Image (tube, helix red, strand yellow):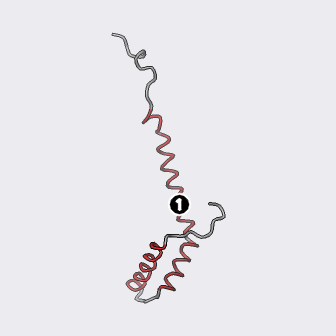
Amino acid sequence: MRGKPTLTIPDEARTRAIASIRQYFAEELDQDIGDLKAGLLLGYVLEELGPTICNAAIADARAFFEERAADLEGVCYHAEFPCWNRPRE
């Protein structure tokens, strides 16, 4: 992963993202932009902001797994040799 170029997204997601950007510009900014401008904006966002978003997602996932792993013993622990450790009547 280190030294990997800009984040990429699948072609279908790219097509939908470009359509979403065009719709945003039309509805929120009253500007009609074409696929080229929307694609350039998407490329910029992926290159410039993508790593920050990716790093935040990785940090969130790591915290989630570390929290679960910290409680692993409490959730999964089973007493060993249970037959011989029971109180005698």
Instruction: Pinpoint residue 71: horizontal percent, then vertical percent.
Output: 46, 39
Q: Residue at x 53, y 60 (%)?
A: 56
The quadrant in which the N terminus is found is: bottom right
Residue at 40% from the left image edge and 17% from the top image edge:
83
Q: Is residue 37 above or below residue 69?
A: below
Is residue 33 placed above or below 43 in the rendered structure? below
Residue closest to the far front? 11
Question: Which amino acid, by three-letter code, is at mark 1?
Answer: Ala
Q: Is residue 80 above or below residue 7?
A: above
Q: Quadrant of residue 81?
A: top left
Residue 14: x and y, percent?
48, 75
Q: Disc 1 marks which residue?
A: 56
Answer few, some or many: residues within 10 Å of disc 1's Cα (few below 14, many 20 plus, some between 14 and 19). Answer: few
SS class, disc 1:
helix
Residue positioned 55% across, 69% down in the render: 50
Q: Which of these two is toward me, 52 or 22? A: 22
Quarter holding the C terminus is top left
Q: In the rendering, at what x and y percent does residue 77 appear? A: 45, 31
Residue at the left extreme?
A: 89
Number of numbered callouts drawn: 1
When the figure is inspected, residue 63 is found, relative to residue 3, above or below; the finding is: above
Residue ranking furthest to the top: 89
Query: Residue 64's spot in the image, x, y percent?
Result: 48, 50
